[in-house]
Amino acid sequence: MAAPITSVELQILEDVLSAFGLAFGGAVTYVTSHVVPKYVKSKTAANAIDALAAIAQSVVQDFNQRIVNDAKANGVWNAQLAQKVKEDAVQAVLAQGANLAALAEKTVGDVQSLVESLVEQAVAKYKAQGSAQLAQNSPADNGQALA
């Protein structure tokens, strides 16, 4: 039979359990006050950047349909107009996503450069989609190639 626990042994056991409880509580406090907010902040910033990218794609598509295509059809498209349209697109994205830009700025810092980059990526994607669509609609792809 096991010997009964003495008061000294019981006190030691209580102290060990208390120390374990304090350590566990400290670990939980650290995780909830340091690790979780950083994760949430980075996740929020990532979501804000993704939303800004979606706005940039929408703005680029709109500008291409309304401004760029008309300027090209009228023969007035040039490098200066292209730069002006890009600047206007960046401003449109910043205006439409003002709250998102504020969130992203807390993590990224220079949101203006970020949005410029997102607009350039959207333009490249739009051009790639346009050339892929042209290739799909070419006579060779439709079995109408000329010999």
Image: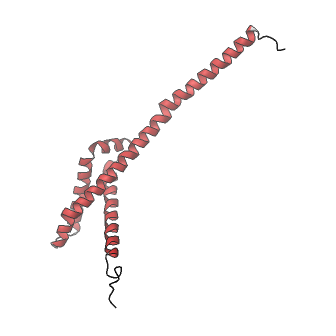
Residue 79, image x, y percentages: 23, 68
Residue 35, image x, y percentages: 50, 35
96 left or right of 107 in image = left
Residue drawn at x 20%, y 68% as measured from the top left: 69
Q: Where the N terminus falls, by quadrant?
A: top right
Residue drawn at x 39%, y 41% as measured from the top left: 44
Residue 137, picture quadrant: bottom left
Q: Is residue 109 visible?
A: no
In the rendered image of this protein, does residue 90 appear above or below residue 31?
A: below
Residue 110, image x, y percentages: 34, 48
140 left or right of 2 in image = left
Q: Where the C terminus falls, by quadrant?
A: bottom left
Residue occupying the far front of the picture: 143
Residue 66, picture quadrant: bottom left
Residue drawn at x 31%, y 42% as measured from the top left: 102
96 left or right of 38 in image = left
> 123 or 90, which lies in front?
123
In the rendered image of this protein, does residue 71 appear above or below residue 31?
A: below
Residue occupying the far bottom of the picture: 147
Residue drawn at x 45%, y 35% as measured from the top left: 37
